[in-house]
Amino acid sequence: MNDASRNRRWLRFSLRTLCSLTRGEPDVVIRWAGPLILVGAVLGFASARLELPGVITAMFAIAFGASGGSLVQWRHERGLWMLAGIFLLLNITIYSLCVYGKVSDLARGAPPNDFGLIIDFSLGTLVLSSTIQFLWRVAKHNWTLSRESENA
């Protein structure tokens, strides 16, 4: 196998994995929970140390990984839909507070921030939307599992 075909195969695998993560597919999110937490922690540390934007994306990447790591038994253990619901509520609340804080700053006449913050909010929103899709799928499946177990 030559290097070109190996590179194409790796690129296909990476794009497929990235698309699956973006869609919030539970098995892929759970498999990548650890790396998501690690990437979020490194990004958060680097952006704080270098005083660059990236904290919002880092925070939601860590939350995405933590959600995936906490819901490993989502297909078997009843009641995890409640944990998924709590994670969903917390993530949406934190995002709403971030947006409210930024809008409040702009309303008070604070100068608009640079392009980096816009990119950070955009990537953070993308990660949050993936998290919401993941949590919704887990909660829906686990709710059904819980209802079937009660009726049996």
Image (cartoon, grey):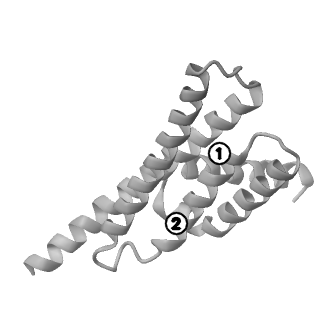
Quarter of the picture holding the C terminus: bottom left
In this view, the residue farthest toward the front is: 108
Percent of width and height locating residue 42 = 79, 59
Residue identified by numbered label 2: 68
Residue at the spot of label 1 = 56
Mark 1–mark 2 distance (CA, rounded to whole Å): 18 Å
Which kind of residue does numbered mark 1 sit on?
Ile
Q: Which residue is drawn at 54% across and 71% down?
A: 69
Residue at point 52%, 46% (across, down): 128
Residue at the spot 37% in from the left edge and 62% down from the top edge? 86
Secondary structure under the numbered disc 1 in the rendered image: helix
Which element is circle 2 on? helix
Tag 2: amino acid:
Gly
In the image, 128 versus 86, the foreground residue is 86
Q: Position of residue 55 (x, y in %)?
A: 70, 47
Q: In which quarter of the image is residue 79?
A: bottom left
Q: Sequence-wise, which precedes: disc 1 or disc 2?
A: 1
Report the quarter where the N terminus lies: bottom right
